[in-house]
């Protein structure tokens, strides 16, 4: 219950429900490994759910974008950042092409 009282002593009471959005999470990660060890032909395709749309994706603090598709990647360590419209953030480290941590 929420009650508000003005300067004249008039009150208004109402009910409110606070709903928490589901947490941002990576739901799938599709990996295409580079053809050779020093190539930049790798691909990461990240899917996510939760949070408040739109969700943006970035690698290594790069420019956020609405798509989770990243191409032209060499082998390396990547920081995957998801950010929703309310500023909620999820960060994961990816040892590419090894595994998600």
Image (tube, rainbow, N blue to C red):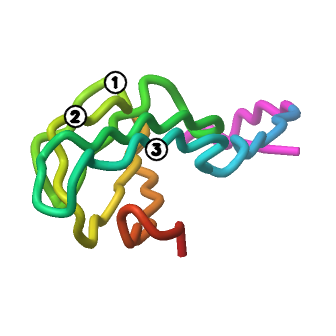
How far apart are the alpha carbons under marks 1 and 2? 11 Å
Image coords of residue 53 (percent x, y): 49, 24
The disc, 1 or 3, on the residue closer to the chain's N-terminal end is: 3
- Disc 1 secondary structure class: loop
The disc, 3 or 2, on the residue closer to the chain's N-terminal end is: 3
- Residue 33 lies left or right of residue 49; in this view the side is left
* Label placed on residue 71: 2
Badge 2 density bin: few <14, some 14–19, many ≥20, Cα 10 Å: few
Say which residue label 3 marks: 31
Number of numbered labels in the structure image = 3
Image coords of residue 77 (percent x, y): 27, 72
- Disc 3 secondary structure class: strand
Badge 1 density bin: few <14, some 14–19, many ≥20, Cα 10 Å: few
Q: Nearer the viewer, residue 52 or 92?
A: 92
- Quarter holding residue 49: top right
Image coords of residue 12 (percent x, y): 77, 31
- Quarter holding residue 51: top right
Q: Is residue 66 magenta?
A: no
- Residue 99 lies left or right of residue 67; in this view the side is right
* Label placed on residue 39: none
Q: Is residue 11 magenta?
A: yes
- Residue 35 lies left or right of residue 82; in this view the side is left
Residue at the spot 31% in from the left edge and 24% down from the top edge: 66
In the image, which residues are magenta? 1-14
**Considering only vertical position in the picture, is 75 above or below 27?**
below
* Label placed on residue 67: 1
Image coords of residue 46 (percent x, y): 47, 38
Residue at the spot 19% in from the left edge and 40% down from the top edge: 41
How far apart are the alpha carbons under marks 3 and 2? 10 Å
């Amino acid at each position: 219950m929420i009650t508000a009282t003005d300067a004249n002593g008039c009150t208004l009471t109402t009910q409110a429900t606070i709903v928490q959005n589901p947490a941002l999470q990576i739901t799938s990660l599709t990996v295409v490994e580079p053809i050779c060890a020093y190539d930049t032909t790798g691909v990461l395709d990240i899917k996510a759910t939760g949070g408040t749309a739109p969700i943006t994706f970035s690698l290594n603090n790069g420019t956020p974008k609405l798509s989770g598709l990243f191409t032209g990647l060499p082998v390396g360590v990547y920081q995957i950042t998801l950010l929703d419209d309310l500023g909620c953030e999820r960060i994961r480290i990816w040892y590419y092409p090894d595994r998600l941590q």
